[in-house]
Amino acid sequence: MNLKSFLIAVLCVFAVSSSFGQANILNAKSPEEIGVKTDAQIFMDNDKPLEYGYVDDRDILYSSMVWEKVVLDERVNFPLYYPIDTNNISKHRRSLFDVIMKSVKNGDIKNIYDDSYFTTKRTLKDIEASMVLVDTTELGVEQFNAGEEISQEYVNRTEITAAHVVEYHIKGLYYFDKRQGELKYRLLGIAPVVPDVNTLTSDEPDLVPLFWVFFPDAREVLHVAKAFNGKNSAIPLSFDHLLNARRFNGYIFKEENVQGDRAITEYIHENALMQLLESDRVKDKIRNFEQDMWSY
């Protein structure tokens, strides 16, 4: 590495360090000043998502669309899940679900969709019924049958929160860029998967995607929000960086195919091991295309 490259790397690290973490924590004279950037930091701040390069359709020699499950009880995926309790933690740390929901509510994420093909738009009002379960106890039912007004103490209200998110479904495209001569991946959509609110109290609740977000539309929001970095808490990772860099573990449950993009579970039934092996086969088929391009 020459001197010029070394200096550029040092400046990048300095800029990242000054942008991430709890700004001004060592210079703060009161708790209110923690997280508030100084004028010098604001002036030097050029923190924005790394732009995708333009890819012409003629440069795509091969592509394959896949859908993956990112299960949140795996340790490597914990930064997407925690924190689930926001009462006793810094306001700068939120789970991916809380970041997405807050952005949908305040309009920073303008569009949410019903499916992964982004054909039907939904609104916040559309999904409210999917997020709240209102149940009446037996005493409340007795009051109702007696013609009395139901006391609020006999009404149980359960709302879907970050703690209920079981996994994320992501949709992405693997493509071979003939100009760059390499296989690349572009994340296109993400959906939080939660228990169906009507089966929330059952032993085996049904899991449903709450809604889909077109990922490029949410990059600005996900770049501002930071995920916890267990290796260096001074430089947390943005959710945009974490997802684009694929710093998570997921397995393919569906690929683009002639049978109407059918899922693996539709042709391999009740055999988790064979479904996992089929997922690996699909992944290896994609990876082998790049390897075969350089085999002589």
Image (cartoon, helix red, strand yellow):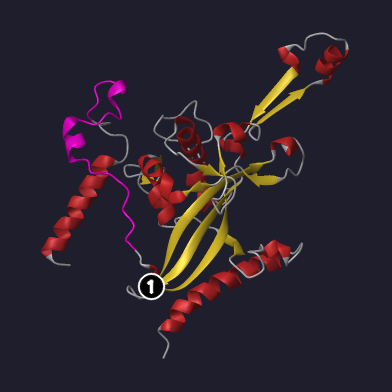
Q: Is residue 273 visible?
A: yes
The 10 Å Cα crowd at callout 1, few under 14, some 14 to 19, many 20 or more, is: few
Figure check: 151 above or below 180: above
Tell me: 219 left or right of 1: right
For image coordinates 35% across by 46% down, the residue present is 232
**Secondary structure category for the residue under label 1:** helix
Which is nearer the eye, 212 or 10?
212
What amino acid is at disc 1? Answer: Arg
Nearest to the observer: residue 165 or residue 219:
219
**How many numbered marks are there?**
1
**Magenta span includes 49:** yes
Q: Residue at 60% of width from left, 73% of height from top?
A: 281
- For the point 32% across and 45% down, the residue is 235
> Which of these two is toward me, 70 or 26?
70
Image quadrant occupied by the C terminus: bottom left
* Residue where numbered disc 1 is placed: 58
Residue 130 is one of the magenta-drawn residues: no
> Start and end of the magenta stretch?
27-54
Q: Position of residue 246 (x, y in %)?
A: 45, 57
- Is residue 217 placed above or below 163 in the rendered structure? below
Direction left: furthest residue: 3
The secondary structure making up most of the magenta span is loop
- The residue drawn where x is 59% and y is 45% is 114
